[in-house]
């Protein structure tokens, strides 16, 4: 059993609770804005835990020893932090490779940008979509919805639009929502230790 699997449910809950508290800052009234550096560290810690508590089918990998590929789109600093945190770790006997992917420039048409992003990650396993263009993260997630890729973003209402896990700000702290139905529609197996700590949301009926 790998080092992630050795954690008990209660311990995992405590870890994520502590991560959320890191982002809260001082409790003065009114609450101060969240420090960007702290927010990035909280997101990185969440992403590391999501990798550790997700299982992919063997069919998701080209070979028996292929790595789990984690993509961080649009945020190079976050990519470096996640890569450092996951260095030399394994999940299910597989090594982990972290890749940074730049967001297409504003001059690139939306449909082209969507297809470019989806094509870049469609053979990978977990993707964080830190995209500044409104609606782009949602559109990419829709193109990937039939694939076994755990899609994560902090785009507004990401899970409602078809994404799987969305970071949200609540009471001046970073928490996360989950689209459990979308996850269950794939071969992904996300631990109940994660889903039990998420706010479960329903996808908008206008979605795919």
Image: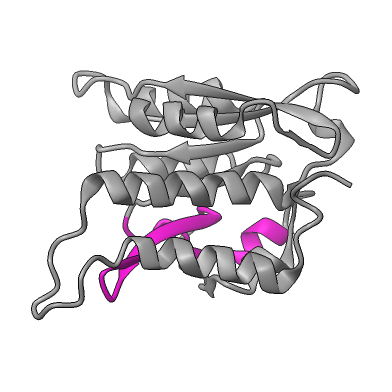
Q: Residue at x 30, y 30 (%)?
A: 110
The answer to whether residue 197 of the structure is visible from this angle is: yes
Q: Based on the displayed image, in which of its 4 quarters is residue 196 positioned?
A: bottom right
What is the x, y in percent for residue 56? 79, 42
What's drawn in magenta, residue-wise?
156-184
In the rendered structure, the answer to whether residue 10 lies left or right of residue 91 reads left
Query: Is 128 part of what is drawn in magenta?
Result: no
What is the x, y in percent for residue 86? 61, 33
* Closest to the observer, 116 or 90: 90
Q: Based on the displayed image, in which of its 4 quarters is residue 136 positioned?
A: top left
Q: Residue at x 36, y 61 (%)?
A: 22
Relative to residue 99, is residue 156 depicted above or below? below
In the rendered structure, the answer to whether residue 105 lies left or right of residue 203 reads left
Relative to residue 119, is residue 170 depicted above or below? below
The answer to whether residue 205 of the structure is visible from this angle is: no
Query: Is 180 part of what is drawn in magenta?
Result: yes
* Closest to the observer, 196 or 158: 196
What is the x, y in percent for residue 162? 51, 55
């Amino acid at each position: 059993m790998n080092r992630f699997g050795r954690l008990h449910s209660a311990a995992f809950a405590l870890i994520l609770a502590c991560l959320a508290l890191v982002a809260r800052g001082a409790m003065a009234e009114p609450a101060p804005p969240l420090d960007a550096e702290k927010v990035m560290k909280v997101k990185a810690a969440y992403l590391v835990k999501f990798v550790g508590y997700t299982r992919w089918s063997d069919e998701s990998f080209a070979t028996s020893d292929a790595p789990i590929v984690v993509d961080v789109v649009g945020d190079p600093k976050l990519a470096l932090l996640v890569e450092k945190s996951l260095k030399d770790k394994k999940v299910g006997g597989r090594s982990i490779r972290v890749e940074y992917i730049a967001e297409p420039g504003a001059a690139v048409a939306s449909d082209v940008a969507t297809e470019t992003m989806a094509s870049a990650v469609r053979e990978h396993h977990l993707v964080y979509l830190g995209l500044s263009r409104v609606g782009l993260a949602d559109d990419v997630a829709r193109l990937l919805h039939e694939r076994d890729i755990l899609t994560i973003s902090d785009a507004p209402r990401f899970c409602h639009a078809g994404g799987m896990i969305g970071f949200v700000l609540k009471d001046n702290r970073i928490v996360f929502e989950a689209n459990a139905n979308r996850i269950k529609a794939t071969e992904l197996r996300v631990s109940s230790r994660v889903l039990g700590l998420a706010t479960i949301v329903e996808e908008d009926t206008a979605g795919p």
